[in-house]
Every structure is written in structure tokens, then in C-alpha cells.
Image (cartoon, coloured by chain):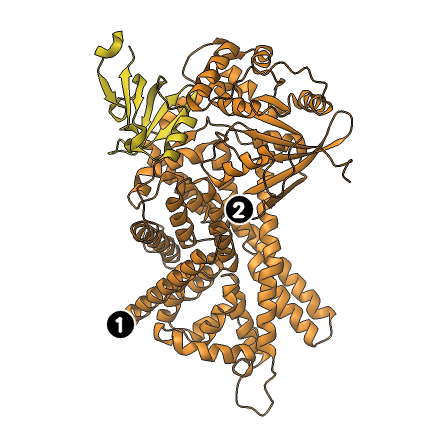
Chain colours: A yellow, B orange
Amino acid sequence: MARSDLTEITLDRLSLRQVAQIRSVDWEAMSENEGRRLRALGLDEGVAVEKLHKGMFGFNDPIALKVGRMMVAVRKSHAMAISVVLSD
Amino acid sequence: MMTEAAPLIVLAGNPNAGKSALFNALTGARQKIANYPGVTVERKAGHFALPNGRPAELVDLPGSYSLDPTSPDEAVTRGVIMGAQDGERKPDAIIVVLDAANLDNHLRFALEIIALGQPTIIALNMMDLAERDGLTLDPAKLEELLGVPVVPTVAVRRRGLEDLSAAVENRLSGNAPVAEPVVAKERDHGLRFQAKKIAQAAIVSETAGRRWSERADALFLHPVAGPIILLAILFVMFQAVFAWSEAPIGWIEQGTEIAAAAVEAGLPDGFFKDFLIEGAIGGVGSVVVFLPQILILFLFILLLEASGYMTRAAFIMDRLMASVGLSGRSFIPLLSSFACAIPGIMATRSISDPNDRLTTILVAPLMTCAARLPVYAIIIGAFIPARDVGGGVGLQGLVLFGLYIFGIVGAMIVALVLRSTVAKGPNAGFLMEMPKYQLPRIRDILLGLWQRAWIFLRRAGTIIFAATVVLWLMLTYPKVPIDSPMSQVDYSAAGRIANVIEPVVAPIGFNRDMALALIPAMAAREVAVSALATTYAIDAPDEEAEARSLTERLQSRWTLPMALAFLAWFVFAPQCISTIAVTKRETNGWKWPTFMLVYLFALAYVAAGITYWTAVALGL
């Protein structure tokens, strides 16, 4: 993989308006049900996401992501289980 | 019957695909709402005519992301589609509703359904919005790739409806050209990539560009402006409940007065006349008066939901809700509970985490519902002076606001305790799709309001009417003998029961009349007001006393600490049979409604007690 030298960060560390591609998801960090919901909402390996909004002032939680043409809210605890690489 | 039964067509699709709008457009106002047997999932059914004039039954299935259910709603959707749901025939055809602007996500569920090989039609809905977003789709290409008919629709503008019913008819008669299904049965990843591939092939052109919905979110989801706007909306909502309802409440009061006067003039004195005036008109009238407030509250909630703002409110509130172990998803049911706990508790179905859901159900009755308003209004009106405490804020309004806050804080503390005891579990996540903003359709809002009004009036005509009548009978009989020194109320059956209860509630400052009002108020809180009115009407020694208002009578018989204790009691007391019943239904058993009854009565007793003792100690 030519891109393996790119830095991976977890999704919660993404800045606003930054676009990234999901590299891997730690499915063990959540229940089976939650994993299924995550995938149902389009959050899965290989998908491009953009961070659009974050929660109330003082908190970076939850965050709103653009997944495809859909906007999805995710909590920080789940975002931390998702590794992304920044798109250029 | 067997051969002529109307074919059953079901509407399936992701949440926010516009399913309900399509359902309303196809069936009109003639809808039947019930529950599936044994579960608490709503079954919404209606009829529409196929092009050949034959009627078809249409059922709107709960929105689902997948045939792999993660909530009771999704389990029913799966059950019906598979033909394995109690209380439903196997559907003759399935209409899968897709949001045209969100194809790659919505196609995933569609592919799952198509793979089942049942007669399926795709309604490519909200084509207008997709076009406005700069998205051009090729329905014919999509049809070719999916192997099932694809009909573009705009449900809210009633576009494509005829084509859709024609496609359904074709499918039913079995002469639709069915291509070889290109869909292989795959799970999860494979399915999603396939969905994405098909979506991309069906998209003719796509222009990027910031859309107005995103621009609106830059404001509504702003970390600082967002919460302020949310607070402002809630403030306007609660203001409107009182400000806008004044006039219609006046009309209803006039109506009941006219009705009572007509009965007074037109009927001979006696049992039937007393029954009509004191029991039926007085009792039910004192409750129907609150219909305007309930409708205004529901109007706001329906508008917030239909516009898509409600999910933004959930997003903003999530962090705060997380601090008591809940999630933003609980915000919507709890906000609805300010109108009435019953729709609030039913709205918890969308919460997938069982502990989150249970906690939300158990604290929902602590949100000050519209049924408490009559009780609060009459007691506050009688005992709290209409004084200005500065800045145009009235003392009465302040006390009312305090009671709302009291309930909210109580709910937060209880939620925190429940989440670390009976509803213990890992802090659930908050995963939610936030749909694009939409202009609410007046027709859909009016339909929703009408359904709410009907439920309330039916309740007033049944439970509340029955409770008032039974109380009136128990207060009127047995008749006190002329030479007895006892009053009619003390001598009556209800009075004797109240005298037994009184020692239990005497420590928290309640007198016999209050104890008496609590019994029928078990049916519904607002009955407390009609119960007090009925009691004091029967107890009046003469005509002149009878003419005094309930307010004056309360002032002459209750002290301020007693009144405050009564208010505190109603913040917590679970006095609503319907809430208990819906909790039993939603939790499948008596365990949790019993728990709810016990903990809320205990809280009510303690809160009323503390209020009373404190007020007495302060010399109020």
C-alpha cells in the first residue's frame, strides 16, 4: 500500500470541514448492535467523511459528519474507535 | 372474502425517505392507526384505488435501515416483509421508498428487500429536492440495474402517484417485465459497496456546492448560537401555550356555561339534572378546557419534527443528556412529554439502547404534562398573589415556571440514579441521521393535530367522564339524613373512604378534601380539579354558598402551606391510568409500571411533606 505512510488519526481528532477516509473501525470497542447501526448509517471502512459540526460550546461531542449525501451524528466515544486518513 | 380481499401493499424504506408523506398522499385522510398485537409498534393503514378501480390496502411500515433489526420498530418491518408478523398478512407487493438525494445510503436497504424476490416497486421519492441539490438521476438506468420497476415521485406535490399505482397494478397482475435480479444475497460490506456502485451509475450529473440546508445548520448547530436558538424556541413554545390559548379556552368555558344554563332551564329538578350539571358538564367541561393548550403544544412539536429541527435539538442536547446517563435521543420523547407522557413514552421506541429507553420511560411522567396545568392553574390562581416581582415577571408565572423546573431537575436526578442502579449499563452511543430541513406540509400537520385532538377528546369522553360520574355518585349517595349533624360529603361513600386515607396524608398537610380529590385523580390528574369542584358544590350549605367560585372556596378551606404541598405532590405523583397502561404495554409487563408507581408516589409524598413542613416553619 502506497498510502500506508500517511498518518492515521482517530475520527474525533478531525477538525471542522476536514475530509478524511475511514481506514479501519475497531468493531470490538462497541456492541454488535451499535456496529450494525454504524454501518447502516454508512460509516464503514473505505468511506469518505467530512466533519461538519460539533456539539455545544466547550465540548467536542457529539460531532456531525457528512457521509455521502447524508449528515450523521456520532458521539466522541464511537469516533475514537474509527481511524481515518486525511484526504488531500 | 378469501378471494376478494384487497391486496396488501406495504411501504418500506429508511427513516426520512418521505414514506409517511407518500402514504398520506396515496390514502388521504382515511387512515387507521392501531398497534400490532403484543408489541407497541404502530400499524398505520389506509386504502387507495388501483387504476383499474380495485381497492388496495396500504400499510406504512416503520422506517428501517436494514432487515437486520436493531429496534422493535425494525423487527416489525422485517416481520411484515418476511410474512411472519402477527396481525398482518404476507404483503402482495412492497413499495420501497428511496430518498433520491440519498441514493447510496438508501439503496442498501432496497437491495436487501429486492433480494427476497417478492414483488417490489421502487418509489424514487423527493426527486425535486435532489434536482435542487444539483443531482440528476436516470431512473431507467436504476431500473435496469435493480431489475425492478422504478417510479420517480414527489409525494408532497402528489407527483408520480398515478405511475406508482399503475406499477403496483402491473406487479400484482404479474405481467410486469421482471428482469433477472442482478442482486446477490450479500451482507453488510458487500451490500453497501454494491449500493454505492449502483447509485453512482444512476447519477447522471452532480454539481457540488453548499446547499441551503447546510447553510442553515451553520447557524442552528453553531456551538454557541445553536443552544441559544433552541432555548428561544422552547421559550416561545411555552409562552404560546398560555398566550394563544386564552381566547379558545374562553369560548369553551362559555360553551359549557351555556350548556349548563340550558339544562338548568330546561329540565325539572332532580337526580338527572344534578347529574348532568354537576357531573357531566361540570366534570368533563373542566377538562376539555385544556384542549387548546394541548393542541398548541402539539403544533410546535409536530412542526419541529416535520421540519427536521428536532434531530438538531437532539444533537445539541446530547452532551447534557449524557451527563445523566441518557442521550440526545431521549430529548425528543421527553419534550413530547410536556404535552403528554403517553406519546412521549411511545416515542421512546426509536431509542435502540434498552437501558436508555427504560430510563426515559420511567422519567417521562416527571415532565410537566398538560394535564397538570388545570391543577397548577387553579391552585396558583387561588393562593399565589398576582404580584409583579420586577422586570414584568409575575409571581404566578414564576411559580409555574418553578414547578416545570422542579420536574425537570427531579427527572435528571432520577435518571442518574436509575442509570447506576436498575437500568445500569454502559453509556449508550448517540448515532442518528439528521435529515435535510424541509418545509412542513400544512396538510400533514393538521392531520397530526386532528389525531391528537381526537385521542384527547375520546379520553375526556371516556376515562375522565367515567371517573367524574363515579365520584359524583359516590359523593351524592348515601344521602345524609335530614336530622344528622354530618355533612353530605362526610356521610357519602367517597367521604368515608377519604376519611380513611386522610390520616395517611395528614402528616404532609393534606385535609380530607385533598385526600378525596386524590382518589378519582388516579384516573387522570385534571380530575382533581373537577373532583374539588364537585365536592364543594355538593358540600355547599345553601344556594349562596354554591354560587361562590372554586377559588374562593379553596381560599377559605386551605392554608398556603397546604396549597404548596398539593402542588409539590402533583409534580411527582403518577396519577394517570393511561400512563401506567402505556408503560405496561411498552415494557411488556407489570414490573416497570409497578416500579414507576411506587417510586413516584414515594417522591410525591416526600416532596409534599418537605414543602409543607418548610412552609409551616417559615410561617407562611
Callout 2 secondary element? loop
Gap in Å between the C-alphas at discs 1 and 2? 48 Å
Q: Amino acid at mark 2?
A: Thr
Residue occupying image coordinates x 55% and y 79%: B493
For this rendering, which residue is in front, B299 or B390?
A: B299
Lateral position of residue B108 relative to residue B572, left or right: right
Residue B285 seen in the current view: no
Q: Residue at x 37, y 56 (%)?
A: B403
Location of residue B453 with respect to B26 vertically, above or below: below
User: Between disc 1 and disc 2, whose residue precedes?
Assistant: 2
Tell me the amino acid under the disc marked 1: Ala
Q: Which residue is mark 1?
A: B617
> Could you tell me which chain the residue with mark 1 belongs to?
B
Q: Chain of mark 2?
A: B
- Horizontal and vertical percent for residue B612? 33, 69
Q: Secondary structure at mark 1?
A: helix
Q: Classify residue B462 as left or right of residue B297.
A: right
Q: Quadrant of residue B594?
A: bottom left
Quadrant of the image occupied by residue A27: top left
Neighbour tally class for label 2: few under 14, some 14-19, many 20 plus, Cα within 10 Å: some
- Where the N terminus of chain B falls, by quadrant? top right
Crowding near the residue tagged with mark 1, few <14, some 14–19, many ≥20 C-alpha atoms within 10 Å? few
- List x then y, in percent, for residue B148: 61, 18
Q: Residue at label 2? A: B40
Q: Residue furthest front?
A: B185
Q: Nearer the viewer, residue B91 or B468?
A: B91
Residue closer to the observer: B378 or B548: B378
